Amino acid sequence: MTDKCRPVAEAVRELIDDGDYLATGGFGANRIATAVIHEIVRQRKQHLGLAGHTTTHDFQLLCSGNLTGRGQLLNRVDAAYIIGLEARGLSPHARRVMESGEVKICEWTNYTLALRFQAASMGVPFLPVRSVAGTDTFQHSAARAVECPFTGQRLTAVPALFPDVAAIHVHQADRYGNCRIRGTAVSDGLVARAAHKVIVTCEELVADDVIREDPTSTVIPFYCVDAVCEVPGGSYPGNMPYAYFSDEEHLRGWLHAEREPERYQQWLSNYLFEVASFDEYLEKCGGRKRLQELRQEELLDA
């Protein structure tokens, strides 16, 4: 148990290498590790793999490192859900990237991709599942048909997935890396146990005594975590359950800017490459005032 607190830029620089396989936490636009994704793009990491486990705005951001004159950030993706921002529509640039053919793709369902993390967290090479077989997804995935040695039943085997690094945003963490998540944790506990290195960003850094008061609330334990970064608003413009709602206006801005490559380049310069940190990005988007408005919206929805 050592003090793992550090700035996001330092964590990304030291823990993510070119060619690494990346897994991101959250689900859809909920609890995205946006600050880490911004820094990955800003530092121009290259040739990363990605687990697209319902990746929406995070996938959209990572694709900004492809086809924009900044090399090839992504070169392979295990996809369950990518390109779409759910009800908001498709990301025009992410679609261009995937249609270009420069990114290798392997298809899964959300469930089978989650099971791959579970297999890794258990230390087993695969898990059997009654899923995917009989669908076109099976033809485009790395799953294999197997026969149960006990019943003779035909099942699907999905291989364990061990990411090089995972980026996960949580509600609270202490300096050692014990993390709390309010609401559904999706597969993040499994992702943290499967990954070789884990960067955690948190809305609030709390004393370890606070964690000890209610240890059963710890979703990710300290021994899984390599870096802890306190980033209030760190899921913006995505949603943070019980904390703030997604900034739908700003997300629409991303989608509209992407329609025209030249306008998109200017948008990236303004919001990513001409800002020094995620805090500066938040200030450009309205700062504390905007986050407070989104907090009120989340509380009203709750």
Image (spheres, grey):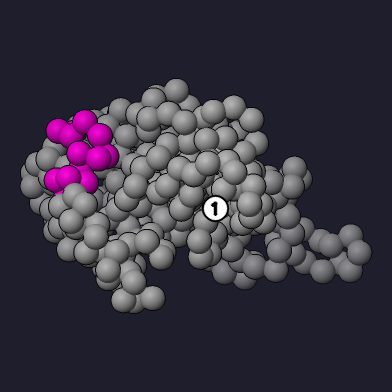
| Residue 236 visible | yes
Q: Could you say which quadrant of the image residue 102 lies in?
A: top left
Q: Where is residue 121 drawn, in percent x and y? A: 69, 46
Is residue 301 placed above or below 69 in the rendered structure? Answer: below
Residue 38 at x, y = what percent?
A: 30, 39
- Looking at the image, which is closer to me, 301 or 36? 301
Indicate the position of residue 274 as horizontal and vertical percent values: 14, 33
Q: Position of residue 87 (x, y in %)?
A: 30, 71
Taking the spot 91% from the left edge, 64% from the top edge, the residue there is: 150
Mark 1: secondary structure = strand
Q: Is residue 259 left or right of residue 109?
A: left
Residue in the picture at 37% in, 61% down? 243
Q: Residue at x 77, y 66 (%)?
A: 154
Q: Who is closer to the viewer here, 126 or 29? A: 29
Q: Number of callouts in the render?
A: 1
* Magenta run includes residue 150: no
Tell me if residue 206 comes above or below residue 140 in the rendering: above
Residue situated in front as seen by the camera: 201 or 261: 201
Give residue 281's quadrant in the image: top left
Residue shown at the point (49%, 44%) measured from the top left: 206
Residue located farthest toward the top when viewing the structure as drawn: 14
The answer to whether any part of residue 161 appears in the image is no
Residue to which mark 1 is pinned: 180
Residue type, numbered disc 1: Arg
Magenta-tinted stretch: 273-285
